[in-house]
Amino acid sequence: MAGFLDRAKAQAQDALAQGKHKVDEVHAQRAGGELLKKLGAAYYAEKRGSGTLEATQQALNALEAHIAAHGDGFLRG
């Protein structure tokens, strides 16, 4: 009986870890999408004359840092 409970506990812990990993992935994708949107807005503002090159570069740097940490999977979907 103890073996069964140990296996059930291990399976529950594995499922919990997989669920947490998926939630983390979704959060990273959303954050990447927001950074990409900010880059687009900064670039548009720069080209329209109401933004600066520095703001665009900061947005690009933030996006590149996110990609280095989490990958670029959010760009595909």
Image (tube, rainbow, N blue to C red):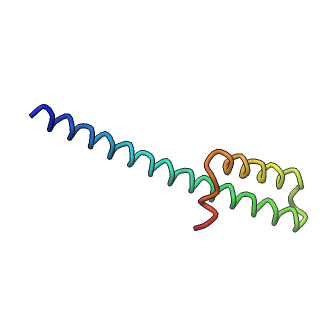
* Residue 13 in the image: above or below residue 50: above
Q: Which residue lies furthest to the left in this view?
A: 1
At which x and y percent is residue 65? Answer: 71, 46
* Residue 70 in the image: above or below residue 74: above
Answer left or right for 3 relative to 64: left
Q: Which residue is drawn at 32% across and 46% down?
A: 15
At which x and y percent is residue 45? Answer: 83, 63
Answer left or right for 21 relative to 9: right
Front position in the image: 64 or 3 = 3
Q: Which residue is drawn at 84% across and 52% down?
A: 57
Front position in the image: 31 or 18 = 18
Front position in the image: 53 or 68 = 68
Q: Residue at x 9, y 34 (%)?
A: 1
Answer left or right for 45 relative to 67: right
Q: Which residue is drawn at 38% across and 48% down?
A: 19
Q: Which residue lies furthest to the front in this view?
A: 3
